[in-house]
């Protein structure tokens, strides 16, 4: 057995693109059969049908363009921190504007909603800390670094979203059982519009950056902002309903939004939980395997492993090389090809063993 490892970034120039229209290598996996029409993106998204699919498409739109990914770890980390800083400023500004509305209206309900938005804005802080920790170099105690702090922050965000849904549902049911007149409806609607606009702007930004850098936690925080925005929108719809002579519109809309958040939370829990359990999107494995199979000198891929550490990928592969080929050169070319296909990869080691 001849073994070679490839873990160096200075060999990226070996990652030449291949022609998808032909197969020169005659690999054992039979590339002539599938015509290269398999997905090349980060396509772990499942197009769910029914209510859950509609909610997922509404709250978490996905991108099909893997070229948008950021390949440099420091640049990706900086982009994540920048997104958190900007979104925190926007949410704090939204809270201040709502506080001004509270001062004019004297509404206790609006005051509670403003405090709620402030506490939600501060969920960016633990994720910010996690991004900072992720930049620390590996040590003898934490040999893989502290990238997993990001996934733990994502778990905290999931808890906050779940708690928000529980509180929203409880308040809606309480208002149904104990109806109260809604005062200063114009101010309530104004505050709802402000809350929706601020949270939606933050949601779009966080989700877009989170998908670019591969951060499930940042996407979850974006979903959190979006659910808060739709909660504010529910306030607007409820206020309009009251103006139209339907006082129960406010709690009914609030309950519908709470239920929608619970349905959406299932996917968010799976996404964050999968990261904690070293799960990875099958589309990424397909792309890495496809890249390896098209490296000249590789006969077959025997084993391939990938995992997320924060918003960066690590992995390794065991391949069988063709007789007479330089194992070191094949490994270097294989690592470069995988890095060219998966721009989120930090460390990827290829071990080449001789074919029989």
Image (cartoon, rainbow, N blue to C red):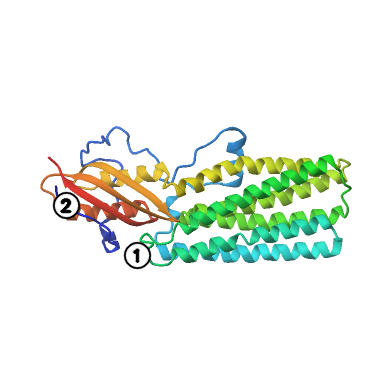
Q: Are marks 2 and 1 in contact (CB under 8 Å)?
A: no
Number of residues whose C-alpha sits closer than 10 Å to that of mark 2, classed few (under 14), some (14–19) or many (20 or more): many
Q: Please name the residue shown 83% across and 40% down the image.
A: 177
Tag 2 residue: 327
Number of residues whose C-alpha sits closer than 10 Å to that of mark 1, classed few (under 14), some (14–19) or many (20 or more): few
Residue 137 x %, y %:
38, 67
Q: Is residue 175 left or right of residue 115?
A: right
Residue 78 in view, yes or no: no
Numbered badge on residue 57: none
Residue 8 x %, y %:
27, 61
Residue 149, placed above or below residue 42: below
Looking at this view, name the residue that lies furthest to the front. Answer: 141
Q: Is residue 238 left or right of residue 333?
A: right
Q: Is residue 56 left or right of residue 8?
A: right
Q: Please name the residue shown 22% across and 53% down the image.
A: 331
Tag 1 residue: 140
Circle nearer the viewer, 2 or 1: 1
Q: Is 208 in front, or is 160?
A: 160
Mark 2 or mark 1, which has the lower sequence index? 1
- Element marked by disc 1: loop
Q: Is 350 in front, or is 151?
A: 151
Residue 146 x %, y %:
43, 61
Q: Is residue 196 left or right of residue 311?
A: right
Q: Please name the residue shown 59% across and 44% down the image.
A: 265
Residue 310 in view, yes or no: yes
Residue 276 x %, y %:
46, 49
Number of marks in picture: 2
- Mark 2–mark 1 Cα distance, whole angstroms, equals 31 Å
């Amino acid at each position: 057995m001849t073994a070679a490892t490839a873990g160096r970034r200075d060999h990226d120039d070996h990652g030449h693109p291949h022609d998808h229209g032909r197969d020169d290598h005659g690999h054992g996996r039979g590339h002539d059969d599938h015509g290269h029409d398999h997905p090349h993106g980060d396509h772990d998204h499942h197009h769910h049908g029914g209510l859950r699919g509609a909610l997922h498409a509404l709250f978490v739109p996905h991108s099909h363009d893997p070229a948008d990914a950021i390949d440099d770890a420091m640049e990706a980390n900086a982009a994540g921190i920048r997104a958190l800083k900007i979104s925190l400023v926007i949410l704090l500004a939204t809270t201040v504007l709502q506080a001004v509305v509270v001062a004019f209206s004297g509404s206790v309900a609006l005051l509670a909603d403003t405090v709620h938005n402030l506490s939600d804005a501060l969920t960016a802080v633990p994720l910010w800390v996690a991004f900072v920790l992720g930049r620390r170099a590996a040590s003898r105690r934490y040999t893989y670094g502290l990238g997993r702090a990001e996934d733990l922050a994502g778990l905290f965000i999931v808890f906050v979203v779940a708690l928000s849904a529980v509180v929203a549902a409880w308040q809606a049911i309480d208002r149904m059982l104990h109806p109260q007149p809604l005062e200063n409806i114009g101010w309530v609607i104004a505050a709802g519009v402000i809350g929706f606009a601020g949270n939606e702007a933050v949601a779009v930004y966080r989700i877009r950056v989170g998908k670019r850098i591969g951060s499930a936690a940042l996407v979850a925080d974006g979903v959190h902002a979006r659910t808060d925005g739709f909660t504010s929108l529910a306030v607007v719809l409820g206020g309009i309903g009251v103006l139209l002579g339907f006082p129960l519109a406010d709690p009914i809309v609030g309950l519908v939004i709470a239920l929608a958040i619970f349905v959406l939370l299932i996917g968010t829990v799976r996404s964050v939980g999968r990261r904690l359990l070293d799960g990875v999107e099958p589309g990424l494995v397909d792309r890495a395997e496809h890249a390896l199979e098209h490296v000249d000198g590789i006969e077959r891929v025997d084993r391939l492993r990938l995992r997320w550490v924060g918003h960066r990928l690590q992995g390794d592969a065991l391949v069988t090389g063709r007789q007479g080929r330089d194992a070191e050169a094949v490994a270097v070319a294989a690592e470069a090809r995988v890095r060219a296909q998966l721009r989120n990869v930090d460390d990827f080691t290829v071990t080449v063993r001789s074919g029989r």
